[in-house]
Image (tube, rainbow, N blue to C red):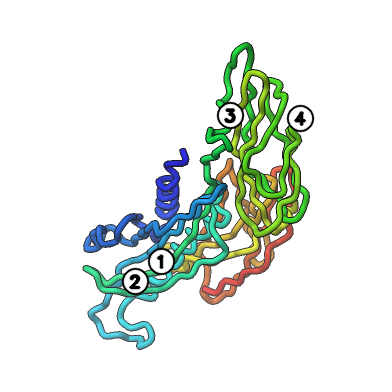
């Protein structure tokens, strides 16, 4: 329900944050209400809803995201004047990874799959402050865009009374649709599909440039302007009544019919342990694509290292590499494959020096 969208955003961000190994607790509200003296809650990610902009098709929520952890200060004298006698640099590195992971999930990961998206960049500011404990971390502001799921018709009623038997016959039932893609400035078409013999079709609040053929239900036109998320209500009617569905359209700058490799590769969570040696997490994004990306092939030093498989709507966005050496510079590339057997080219190279 639309009235639950704030809770939905916070719940999804909490769920995503807790999946990161460097996040133990996610809180929201006033930071002063959080018991920062409890060392067991750290590392901590705190979410603050700053403001919300409501548009006809989308809702944009601005959140302040604070990722922090306790700084351990050694009682021994510092042996390195650059790093001092505490682990503040380690904390800043790990908590920046938490913030970056959350941002990348909104760009093309699991959060994007539930129609939560964000802009191109975020500005993050480091901090180190004394509360009950000495804390360090990063504060960043993220704008989250989501569909406005409340559609209001010209007469003030929600579109269509809904499917079911009408007086004397069956009301049409409009088929739901996954999110659609269109490249800005190119022709777009979408066929409204409905059962029970509709006799007319209509659309409410469509993106500028789109129209519908009332007799066939074919929506067509050209969307221009900036890349964005759009939505519209589509309705099928007959003499017994009507039914409506909300359709979401991603207007993008790239051609979404072409399978391309990830445009961003990241190396995060670099660490060392006696058990696993040097390790890091390789991450990637998913450029817009109308097909179903099912396969991720990862090449290390230009040799296929492993193949991963996406299952259902969830998309894998990172994998952990272990037992590496700090005396070697590694090369990584990624390519995608879809459910029809098509493969993209290799991505640009990411060099990792541990």
Dot label at residue 160: 3
Dot label at residue 260: none
Circle 2 packing at 10 Å, graded few (<14), some (14-19), many (20+), is many
SS at mark 3 in the image: loop
Q: On the image, numbered disc 2 is attached to which residue?
A: 136
First reached walking from the N terminus: tag 2 or tag 4: 2
SS at mark 1 in the image: helix
First reached walking from the N terminus: tag 1 or tag 3: 1
Residue furthest toward the front? Answer: 155
**Camera-nearest residue between 242 and 156:** 156
Q: Position of residue 201 (x, y in %)?
A: 70, 31
Q: On the image, numbered disc 4 is attached to which residue?
A: 215
Q: Are marks 1 and 3 in contact (CB under 8 Å)?
A: no
Q: Are marks 2 and 3 in contact (CB under 8 Å)?
A: no
Residue occupying image coordinates x 72% and y 49%: 209
**Camera-nearest residue between 167 and 223:** 167
Instruction: Identify whether 265 is placed above or below 197.
Output: below
SS at mark 4 in the image: loop
Q: Are marks 1 and 2 in contact (CB under 8 Å)?
A: yes
Q: Position of residue 282 (x, y in %)?
A: 55, 62
Q: On the image, numbered disc 1 is attached to which residue?
A: 95
Residue occupying image coordinates x 41% and y 50%: 10
- How many callouts does the rendering have? 4
Circle 4 packing at 10 Å, graded few (<14), some (14-19), many (20+), is few
Q: CA distance from mark 4 to mark 1?
A: 56 Å
Report which quarter residue 67 is drawn in.
Answer: bottom left
Q: Of the residues tagged 2 and 3, which is closer to the observer?
A: 3
């Amino acid at each position: 329900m639309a009235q639950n969208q704030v809770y939905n955003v916070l719940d999804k961000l909490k769920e995503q944050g807790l999946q990161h190994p460097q996040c133990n607790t996610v809180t929201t509200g006033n930071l002063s209400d959080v018991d920062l003296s409890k060392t067991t809650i750290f590392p901590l990610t705190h979410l603050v809803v700053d403001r919300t902009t409501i548009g006809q098709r989308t809702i944009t929520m601005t959140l302040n995201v604070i990722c922090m952890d306790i700084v351990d200060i050694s009682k021994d004298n510092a042996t390195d004047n650059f790093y001092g006698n505490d682990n503040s640099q380690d904390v800043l590195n790990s908590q920046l990874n938490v913030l970056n992971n959350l941002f990348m999930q909104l760009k093309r990961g699991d959060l994007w799959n539930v129609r939560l998206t964000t802009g191109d960049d975020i500005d993050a500011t480091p901090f180190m402050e004394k509360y009950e404990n000495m804390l360090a971390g990063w504060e960043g502001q993220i704008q989250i865009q989501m569909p406005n799921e409340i559609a209001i018709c010209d007469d003030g009623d929600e579109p269509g009374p809904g499917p079911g038997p009408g007086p004397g016959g069956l009301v049409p039932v409009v088929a739901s649709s996954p999110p659609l893609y269109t490249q800005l400035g190119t022709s777009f078409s979408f066929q409204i599909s409905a059962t029970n013999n509709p006799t007319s079709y209509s659309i409410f609040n469509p993106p500028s440039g789109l129209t519908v053929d009332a007799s066939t239900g074919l929506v067509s036109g050209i969307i221009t302007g900036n890349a964005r998320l759009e939505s519209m209500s589509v309705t099928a009617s007959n003499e017994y009544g009507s039914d409506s569905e909300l359709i979401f359209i991603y207007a993008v700058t790239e051609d979404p019919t072409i399978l391309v490799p990830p445009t961003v590769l990241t190396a995060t969570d670099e660490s060392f342990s006696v058990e696993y040696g040097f390790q890091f997490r390789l991450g990637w994004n998913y450029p817009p694509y109308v097909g179903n990306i099912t396969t991720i092939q990862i090449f290390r030093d230009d040799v296929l290292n492993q193949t991963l498989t996406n299952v259902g709507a969830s998309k894998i966005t990172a994998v952990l590499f272990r037992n590496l050496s700090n005396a070697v510079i590694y090369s990584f590339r990624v390519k995608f494959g879809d459910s029809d057997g098509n493969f993209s080219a290799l991505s640009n190279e990411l060099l990792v020096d541990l």
